[in-house]
Image (cartoon, helix red, strand yellow):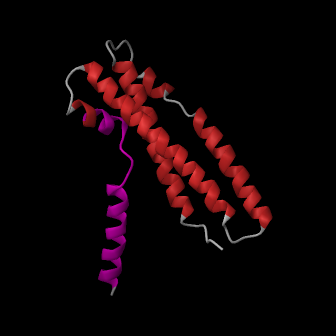
């Protein structure tokens, strides 16, 4: 029985690791494996950033809609709604200054590629966090 529990635990842990948000480097590699020219990589990264922003907005709206259906006192709903709106606004303040500072005197499109990869990665991580948090909501 103990072996079965360990197996189940490891299965779910590995599954969550496999679904982890891609890092800046992972995103860069996805584009650079397909394209060689840095201008094409910028276009690829711009597309990935745009997709992640659209998905993030959709997920934020879904969270607000689900909170309206949450089976708790109205005061708790109001507090959670206020908190998610504040959280979304704070998330917008995230930036990639540290990642960008590590670029030093890089030339070409390196700065733009790195910034887009960083922002895309942050968006995907936040989407995953929201999706995980939604499992706690019990609808009416």
Q: Please provide percent x and percent y for residue 52.
A: 44, 41
* Number of callouts: 0
Task: Indicate whether residue 135 is drawn in magenta.
Answer: no
Q: Is residue 25 above or below residue 13?
A: above
Judge from the rendering whether residue 33 lies leftward or rightward of residue 121; answer left or right.
left
Q: Residue at x 45, y 21 (%)?
A: 101
Task: Indicate whether residue 26 is drawn in magenta.
Answer: yes
Q: Is residue 62 above or below residue 49?
A: below
Please state, as top left, top right, bottom left or bottom right, where the N terminus lies in the image: bottom left
**Range shown magenta:** 2-29
Query: Is 51 in front, or is 92?
Result: 51
Q: Residue at x 48, y 27 (%)?
A: 98
Q: Please provide percent x and percent y for residue 121.
A: 42, 39
Task: Examine the image and state in which quarter residue 48 appears.
Answer: top left
Q: Is residue 89 above or below residue 132?
A: above
Identify the main secondary structure in magenta.
Answer: helix
Q: Residue at x 23, y 30 (%)?
A: 32
Q: Residue at x 54, y 54 (%)?
A: 130
Q: Please provide percent x and percent y for residue 54.
A: 48, 41
Q: Please provide percent x and percent y for residue 23.
A: 36, 40
Task: Examine the image and state in which quarter residue 91 appears.
Answer: top right
């Amino acid at each position: 029985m103990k072996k079965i529990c360990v197996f189940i635990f490891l299965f779910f842990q590995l599954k969550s690791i496999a679904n982890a948000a891609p890092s800046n480097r992972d995103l860069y590699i996805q584009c650079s494996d397909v394209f060689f020219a840095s201008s094409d990589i910028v276009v690829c990264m711009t597309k990935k950033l745009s997709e992640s922003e659209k998905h993030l907005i959709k997920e934020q709206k879904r969270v607000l809609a689900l909170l309206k259906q949450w089976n708790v006192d109205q005061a708790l709903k109001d507090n959670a709604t206020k908190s998610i709106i504040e959280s979304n606004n704070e998330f917008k303040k995230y930036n990639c200054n540290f990642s960008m500072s590590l670029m030093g005197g890089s030339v070409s499109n390196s700065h733009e590629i790195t910034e887009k990869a960083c922002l895309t990665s942050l968006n995907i991580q936040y989407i995953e966090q929201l999706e995980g948090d939604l499992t706690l909501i019990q609808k009416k």
